[in-house]
Image: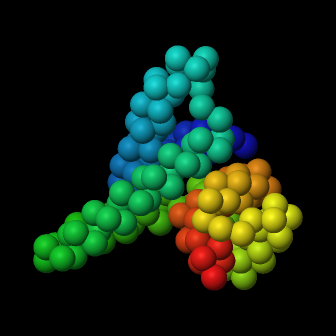
Amino acid sequence: MSLRARFMEDLKAAMKAGQSGRVGTLRMVNARLKDVDIGARAKGGEVAEDEIVSMLRGMIKSRTESAAMYRQGGRPELAEKEEAEIETIRGYLPAELDAATLEAATREAIAELGAASMQDMGRVMAALKARFGAALDAGRASATVKTLLSA
């Protein structure tokens, strides 16, 4: 089942179950997805699944930053709301690679490409994205590549 279909099915189920927090989060995800689709019309249609995953990761990042700011500002109730949204959104992401697997794959890509410096980071990242697709968290992968190339 595609992510779009899962969003709609889960939204209906949450509405029937009276889960107002989940309903709000799923409506927000659907609204963001429509915005992304509108932006992609120039390219010729709906966005692909990997772009939806990227959109979801961006939503998680912004909510993580918001939750941190709410905690700093003494508003734990708002931070908890953001964190609940993060958990709901995370349920739609593919399983992420664990640290050991990511590091091993990065070392393998560096060896295959003969990467030796930070100038090769783009090539290494492209190889990792091609290999893992949506399962790759680009932020974590970037940090791992930087660490290994600068060592």
Q: Residue 79 lies in what quarter of the image?
A: bottom left
Residue sitting at 81 percent across and 65 percent down? 114
Residue found at the very far left of the displayed protein: 74
Instruction: Indicate the quadrant containing the C terminus: top left, top right, bottom left or bottom right.
Output: bottom right
80 relative to 94, above or below:
below
Residue found at the very far right of the displayed protein: 112
Q: Position of residue 33 (x, y in %)?
A: 48, 36
* Tally of numbered discs: 0
Q: Position of residue 117 (x, y in %)?
A: 65, 68
Q: Position of residue 43 (x, y in %)?
A: 58, 20
Residue sitting at 32 percent across and 65 percent down? 65
Q: Position of residue 78 (x, y in %)?
A: 22, 66
17 relative to 44, above or below:
below
Q: Residue 74 lies in what quarter of the image?
A: bottom left
Position of 23 with respect to 111 (left or right) is left
Instruction: Indicate the quadrant containing the N terminus: top left, top right, bottom left or bottom right.
Output: top right
Position of 132 with respect to 117 (left or right) is right
Residue sitting at 66 percent across and 77 percent down? 148
Q: How is the image coloured?
A: rainbow
Q: Is residue 36 visible?
A: yes
Position of 109 with respect to 120 (left or right) is right
Residue sitting at 76 percent across and 55 percent down? 127
Camera-nearest residue between 113 and 95: 113
Q: Is residue 14 visible?
A: no
Position of 98 with respect to 29 (left or right) is right
Camera-nearest residue between 19 and 35: 35
